[in-house]
Structure formats: structure tokens, C-alpha cells
Image (spheres, helix red, strand yellow):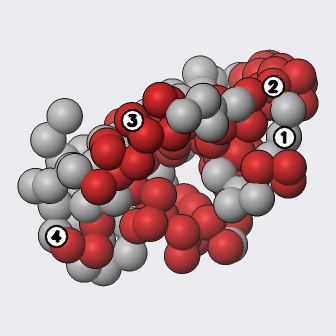
Amino acid sequence: MGLTFCKRVMFQKGHLTARSDIYSFGVVLLEILTGRRCIDKNRPTGEQILVEFVKPYLTSKRRILYIMDPRLAGQYSPNVAMRAAMLATKCLLKEPKHRPTADEVVKALEQLQDLQNAADGSRREPVRKHGEGKPVSYPRPAGLGSSSGKS
């Protein structure tokens, strides 16, 4: 309730800006990357609010892979996935003036697409296959469980 009320008050008082839209985009990007909802009361207490849950994982490029939705495995190169998560991190910066502009976000997404296209073109097999035809998996830390949750 607190989060919803806060958003409603911000909207009513006209505090929504282009930079708050960037924050929202960062949340949506995290939802896509993790396969989790922004707020999920069905998860354990420390995992209910997505942005708070992923913060420790966004401090390291290696740790970012632990929060990736396993359903994305093999569809994107790990480098592109990590860069997308880093873009989300920039969009979620606490200080709005430090967040990227919409133009900067678009350019970053175009660069990600170019990187993925280059990765796709440099492989003989489709991106979705690795080795013996098994999908490439992102690592999962012990105790984290499935990130698919209830959608």
C-alpha cells in the first residue's frame, strides 16, 4: 500500500518527470531480465520488492547473472544480458539527475542490439544452442531457487 500511495501522491502533485519515467523503465527492464514482478507478496520477505532484492546482485557483473531469468538462457549472450542489467542499474539511480536521458537509453539499447547481432553473426550455430544442443544456462546461487515465480 505504501508504494502505491506514494506513486499516487507523486502523480497528483505533479512530481512525475522524464527522469521518473526512466526509473520506471529501469524497473520494467529488471522485470524482463529477472522474470519477476515489481512487487510480489508471494515471495519471501526479502524478495518481495524487486528493486530492493536485486540491489546486491547489481554491484558485480558476475553476480548479475544469478538473477537472470533462466528462460532467457541461450537467447542472449551473457555480455549483452550483463550490459542490459547495468543499463537498468543506471536507470534506477536514486538521484534523478544521474539517471540517463531517454535518448541515452535508446542509444544504449541500440548498442545492445548491435552487440547481440554481432554475437549472433559470429556463431555457426544458432544462439539458442551450445555444445551438444543444450541451452546455455545462467548460473544460480544455492538457495536462490527459481526466478520464474508466479506471474
Q: Are marks 3 and 1 in contact (CB under 8 Å)?
A: no
| Quarter holding residue 36 | top left
Question: Helix, strand, or loop for circle 3?
Answer: helix
Q: Secondary structure at mark 4?
A: loop
Q: Residue at x 62, y 37 (%)?
A: 15
Count of marks, rendered view? 4
Residue receiving disc 2: 102
Q: Secondary structure at mark 1?
A: loop
Q: Which residue is mark 4?
A: 44
Residue 102 on image: x %, y %: 81, 25
- Pointers 2 and 1 in contact (C-beta within 8 Å): yes
Write the residue at 70% across / 31% down: 17
Question: Residue 41 at what x, y percent from top left?
Answer: 14, 55
Residue furthest to the bottom in view is 142
The residue beneath circle 3 is: 8
Say whether marks 1 and 4 touch (CB < 8 Å).
Answer: no
Which label number is shown at residue 100?
A: 1
Q: Nearer the viewer, mark 2 or mark 3?
A: 3
What's the residue type where badge 3 is placed? Arg
Camera sees residue 20: yes
Of the image marks 1 and 4, the number of the one nearer the N terminus = 4
Q: Can residue 130 be seen at all in this image of the molecule? A: no
Q: Is residue 123 left or right of residue 12?
A: right
Q: Is residue 116 toward the left or the right of residue 70 in the image?
A: right
Report crowding for label 4: few under 14, some 14 to 19, many 20 or more residues within 10 A (C-alpha): few
